[in-house]
Amino acid sequence: MRKYIVGNWKMNGTSADLKEIEAIATMSTSYAVSVDSALCIPATLIDRATSRLPEFNLGGQDCHMNVSGAHTGCVSAVMLSDAGATLTLVGHSERRAGQNESDADIRGKATAAQVVGLKVIICVGETLEERDAGQALDIVLGQVEKSVPDNAASDWLSIAYEPVWAIGTGRIPDDSDVAEMHGAIREQLVGRFGADGNNISILYGGSMNGENAAMLLAIPNVDGGLIGGASLTAAKFEPILAAAAKSC
Ligand code: 13P
């Protein structure tokens, strides 16, 4: 499977950063022969960034499950698509925790995005307390089961496993824990969706950077990465794409 490397800028970026988005897009095209890449940027920048970079995959970080209506402050999947986005994240742990999003919410958002033709990355992951209590597999597999819609297919859906305790902390799980989790997610996807479950990309996220990317991307069933801090500049993002290209 081609590796899929996606940056998540979170709540970072104003018009002054459009140049860096352009630099990332230009840099990414030199890896496009073997690596798929995308950048999920603040909704306020999507329209301007996609106007400048119509060939590069730019996405949102969340969407509402409804098309329109009385939802002050929210952005719908239709709006993302209208602004030129080709993908969106849903269910990031920072939204599950900060905005109290449930698996049912996330499933609704994923469906809303799929309906308008966006590719979707559903994020899952356990907290440190859950891992320490030996519940990581149960929690994550439960999130996958409940937040992935029944019509999931590899042409529009990817999963990102992001242990909450690895996000922004510089800590990453042991290889064996990543392999176990990705293998268990794969098994569940194949059990539910048949052979196409083998083609659904399962990304790893949480403190991935230029130094650890090659090791993480070599783990079975790690089909790419979802990268926060190290996606903010082309200089930091490039070694991850290079590692992905080498791992093909
Ligand atoms: P960091 O790469 O900064 O740890 O963030 C990971 C993440 O949350 C990507 O969605």
Image (spheres, rainbow, N blue to C red):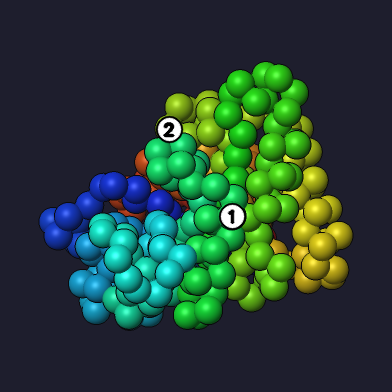
* Residue 53, picture quadrant: bottom left
Q: Nearer the viewer, residue 118 or 219?
A: 118
Instruction: From the image, tell me which residue sits under label 1.
Output: 104
The quadrant of the picture occupied by the N terminus is bottom right
Q: Nearer the viewer, residue 173 or 193?
A: 193
Indicate yes or no: mark 2 CB to ligand 1 under 8 Å.
Answer: yes
Residue 124 makes an appearance in the image:
yes
Secondary element under disc 1, as helix, strand or loop, is: helix
Secondary element under disc 2, as helix, strand or loop, is: loop
- Dot 1: within a 10 Å radius of its alpha carbon, few (fewer than 14), some, or many (20 or more) residues? some
Residue 90 vs 139, above or below: the answer is below
Labelled disc at residue 168: 2
Residue 162 vs 48, above or below: the answer is above
x and y, in percent, of residue 209 in the image: 47, 40
Which residue is farthest left?
A: 16
Residue 5 makes an appearance in the image:
no
Q: Amino acid at mark 1?
A: Ala
Q: Amino acid at mark 2?
A: Gly
The quadrant of the picture occupied by the C terminus is bottom right
From mark 1 to mark 2, how far is it between C-alphas?
26 Å
The residue under the point 60% across, 39% down is 125
The residue under the point 54% across, 74% down is 114
